[in-house]
Image: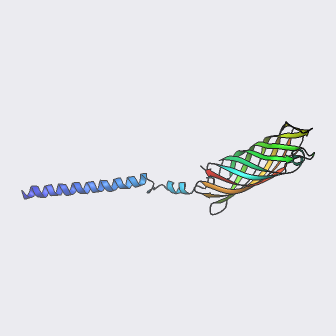
Amino acid sequence: MRTLERLALAAIIGALAGLDARTEEGRSLAEAGAGNVDPTGAQAQIAFDPSRSPLGRWHLWVKSAQTDFRGDAVADWGVDRATHVGLEFYRAEGRMYHLGGEIGSTSAGEAIDSDGEVIQDFGLFSLEGNNKWVFDLTHGFTADVGFGASIFWVQGDEVTYWDGDESSSSLASFGFGLQFFGDLTWRVHRLLIGVDVKYQTAADWLYQRYPNVRLGAHLGVAF
């Protein structure tokens, strides 16, 4: 009887030891699956990938800027300063090079042209295709420079007065431009905050020139 008790006790102890071993093995596998144990070092590669852009695979931001016009835009439209709102979007084609563009609108309520006529509801709508290069600085900061080409549509209403009566006529034109720009961005997790400057030289099909400088800020997200 004592021999059977010893054999039973030994069997129980062996079974418990086997269960404990399987439990430890399962815990190790679970930790490896969760990324806590990674014998290949892949987890470290995800944390720091030297081939990945500091602004993510994709990024976009909304920008608001003040646009200062020169040339015929001032003489013919009477607009020397206007508010610009745009949406920029880019895809990383490597660590530094990015391809993308901007959709934007620049508008002013009322202005006086060189002939003394009143121009109302001035608007310049642009579509840009851009290239840019991003440089990783430090503490989440990046700087980028780029250039591109654009098409634009400009419109407004010219208001005239005759014998006390007011009348308006719509004016519109389209053209092409080239732009050069630079951005300074701070990344916090996926949030992007920064400032930007852009110079654009543009002309419409009537050879009227619309050179302008934009200085503004942007807020966006990285993917």
Nearest the camera: 139 or 122? 122
Question: Which residue corresponds to the image point at 14% horizontal and 55% vertical from the top-left?
Answer: 8
The percent position of residue 52, horizontal first and vertical second, equals 61, 52
In the rendered image of this protein, does residue 223 appear above or below residue 165?
below
The percent position of residue 37, horizontal first and vertical second, equals 43, 57
Colour treatment of the image: rainbow
Name the residue at the left extreme. Answer: 1
Nearest the camera: 105 or 39? 105
Question: Which residue corresponds to the image point at 50% horizontal and 54% vertical from the top-left?
Answer: 42
Count all numbered tags in the image, as a single digit. Answer: 0
The percent position of residue 116, horizontal first and vertical second, equals 92, 46
The percent position of residue 5, horizontal first and vertical second, equals 11, 57
Question: Left of 207 or right of it: where is 122?
Answer: left
Quarter of the figure with residue 140: bottom right
Which quadrant: the N terminus?
bottom left
Name the residue at the bottom extreme. Answer: 139
Question: Which residue corresponds to the image point at 22% horizontal and 54% vertical from the top-left?
Answer: 15
Quarter of the figure with residue 175: top right
Nearest the camera: 200 or 9? 200
Nearest the camera: 137 or 164? 164
